[in-house]
Image: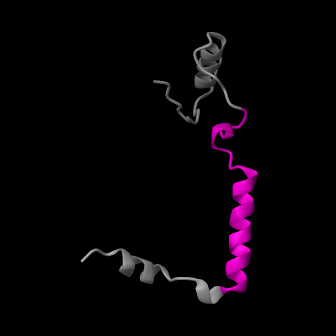
């Protein structure tokens, strides 16, 4: 099973180790560390659409307290 790890390099010598691993084809460096987590444009458009809708229809919003009350199983 292949795993993906996101790391922050704190020391200069660690960066050199990562470069050596890349040369040995042991790691794959991503451009900004987010390539596998990019949000698709259609999803961002949908969020904007929903925000616009609820800005125009605030009476349809449900408070977090009401949501919590509905979720409590008695």
Q: Where 43 sits versus 24, above or below?
A: below
Residue lying furthest top: 24
Q: On the image, which quarter does residue 33 sit in?
A: top right
Image x and y of residue 58, in percent: 64, 86
Q: On the image, which quarter does residue 36 sit in?
A: top right
State which region is magenta. Answer: 31-57
Identity of the residue drawn at 59% across and 18% down: 17
Identity of the residue drawn at 69% across and 73% down: 51
Which is more toward the observer, 72 or 16?
72
Q: Where 5 sits versus 14, above or below?
A: below
Identity of the residue drawn at 72% across and 58% down: 44
In this rendering, position of residue 31 left or right of residue 21: right
Locate the N terminus and report the quarter of the image it occupies.
top left
Locate the C terminus and report the quarter of the image it occupies.
bottom left
Q: Where 11 sits versus 37, above or below?
A: above
Residue lying furthest bottom: 59
């Amino acid at each position: 099973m292949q795993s993906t790890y996101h790391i922050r390099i704190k020391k200069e010598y660690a960066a050199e180790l990562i470069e050596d691993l890349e040369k040995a084809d042991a790691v794959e460096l991503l451009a900004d560390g987010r390539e596998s987590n990019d949000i698709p444009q259609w999803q961002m458009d949908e969020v904007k659409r929903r925000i616009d809708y609820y800005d125009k229809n605030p009476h349809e919003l449900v408070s977090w307290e009401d949501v919590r009350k509905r979720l409590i199983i008695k």
